[in-house]
Each structure stands twice: as C-alpha cells, then as structure tokens.
Image (spheres, rainbow, N blue to C red):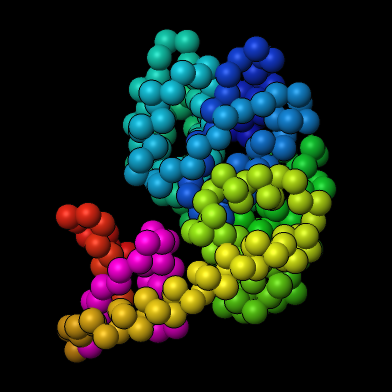
Amino acid sequence: MASVEDVRNFLNEIKPDQKICIVYHHDCDGVCSAVLMLKLLARRCLSANFIDVYASDYEDTLKIETDKFIFLDIGVTELELKENQSALIIDHHLAERDLSSKNVVHYNIRFSNQNAYQPASYLVYKIFETELRDLAWIAALGTVADYGFEDCLDLLNNFVKVKSKEKMADTKIMKVANMVNSAIAIKGCYWVVERLFEAPSIDKIKKDKEMVEAHKIFEQEMERCRKEYFESAEKNFNEKVIIGSVNSKYSEVASTISSALSSEAPDKIFIVLEKRGKNYKIS
C-alpha cells in the first residue's frame, strides 16, 4: 500500500523533460482534483496533458505516449505500462486490489480504512496542502460535489456551517458545485478545467456568465427529462422500484436524475435508462 510520502516522492522525482499525462474522472471531483494537480505541477515549472474519461474507459489512455501517468478519481483495476513508464493513482472508490509496484504508486484511503470517504479533490489537496493552501476552495468544491462530509470537515469547516451532509444542498458551495457539473455537461471538461485554473476565487466562478448560462440550459434539460422519465416509468415490487427512460444529448442527465430522485426518496430504487446508439446506459 502506497503512503502519502510515496505520492510526494513520485511527484518530486519527475524530471523537467519528462512527459506527464493526467487522466481524471468526468465529474466535478475529477475536474477539481485535476485542476489542483495542474496547479501544483505549474508551480513546480512542470506541464501536463490532461484527459477526462468515464470511469470504465481509462484503459484507452494507456496508448498515449507519455512517461508519467497520473490517474485521479479513477478506480483503476488493471494497468499495463511500458517498461519506461510509471503511474500515480489517487482514488477513493472501493478498489478490487492494490496495484502498487515498482513503477506504480497506488494511493487509496480505503486501503487503510474501508469506511473512510474522502473524495479525490480532498486527497490531492491534503497531500500537497503546504503548496496549495490558496486553492482550498477548489478542493472543497470537488469534495462537496462528491458528497464528502464527515471525513473532510478539517477542510469543509472553512466553507460550510451545516452539521450534516443532508443540509449541504442549500449551501453556497454546493450550488456552485452544481453549476460546475452543469458546465461539464454543456461545455465539456476541458473548458471547465481551464475556467477553474484561471479563476482567483469561488466568487469568480459563481458570477461567470457562461457558467450561469450553462447551468440554466442544463436545469431546463433536467426538468424536461425528469418529466419524460415519469411519463415512461413502470413501478415494480410494491412500487419500490421505478424504471423509466430518458433521451438527452447530454450524457450526464440520466445519472443526475437518478441521484436527485434517490436523495428525494431514499426508500425507493430509481433506475434510469438512457439510449446510446443500439444500447442502453443504466443509471
């Protein structure tokens, strides 16, 4: 099992002429952890390519010609590297196995505490806190977006005053996190990464006109698809399981609806089907 010191050593040993590729999850936590890592590298006069992926698609990135891979918020289960390559994995999902080896540093808080829940943004920030203190707001943004709370209060207490995760929905920072997720759906991860990288504060993001407009578009699409879901819904098992479908050009809509409905009615199971070509994606 890799330690915090192993993670720091991996970054410390990167040479200026080496190519770095950051692979991050296609959501707010993934984006925020990537921005933190890009900022850290920039402050060390290093640069990196960055690629967003859905959790199950990371293997395609291994074809990229690079010296160092940095996987953030990705549950990497298999990793075949070339002889001259090495990789750092920082993740918080339940892992099938520890991939740590001679050329892989696999850091996952769940290896030492299976019940801990600390999103990738929180982990990156805490490991390199001395260099990233002015960017705590980015770490907090990614953390609340991924519903980190009890195990992240040393960071979040500076941004929220609520006493439970259930109260987070009405906080300023969660509303900005929702804006970021909307922008990811409408504008794409690259656009959001660049916006966050350049922003001096969370207020700049909150007032960003293009962010606000993207959020408005996404909320309208959510409302349309939510209605579509219930119109197509079938209820099973004493109406405890509800299955319905949506059709949207934005891939994040189905999972967002599923999460929202589950929060509103935790005693029920909501299955959202979304047609993708000849197949269906299930959320």
Q: Residue at x 23, y 76 (%)?
A: 243
Magenta span includes 222: no
Q: Residue at x 25, y 76 (%)?
A: 244
The answer to which quarter of the image holds residue 180 is bottom right
Q: Residue at x 30, y 68 (%)?
A: 247
- Relative placement, left or right, of 138 versus 203 is left
Q: Nearer the viewer, residue 63 or 249?
A: 249
User: Where 137 sits versus 10, above or below?
Assistant: below
- Relative placement, left or right, of 251 versus 21 is left
State the quadrant of the C terminus: bottom left
Q: Nearer the viewer, residue 181 or 15?
A: 181
Q: Which residues are magenta?
A: 239-265
User: Where 86 sits versus 48, above or below?
Assistant: above
Where does residue 194 sit, x and y in percent of width and height?
A: 66, 45
Where does residue 56 sit, x and y in percent of width and height?
A: 34, 44
User: Where 82 sits versus 162, above or below?
Assistant: above
Q: Nearer the viewer, residue 58 or 107?
A: 58
Q: Nearer the viewer, residue 100 or 12?
A: 12
The answer to which quarter of the image holds residue 130 is top right
In this view, which residue lies farthest toward the bottom? Answer: 238
User: Where 23 sits versus 162, above or below?
Assistant: above
Magenta span includes 252: yes
- Relative placement, left or right, of 271 versus 33 is left
Can residue 97 be seen from the camera position used here? Answer: no
Can residue 252 be seen from the camera position used here? Answer: yes
Where does residue 230 sit, x and y in percent of width and height?
A: 30, 84
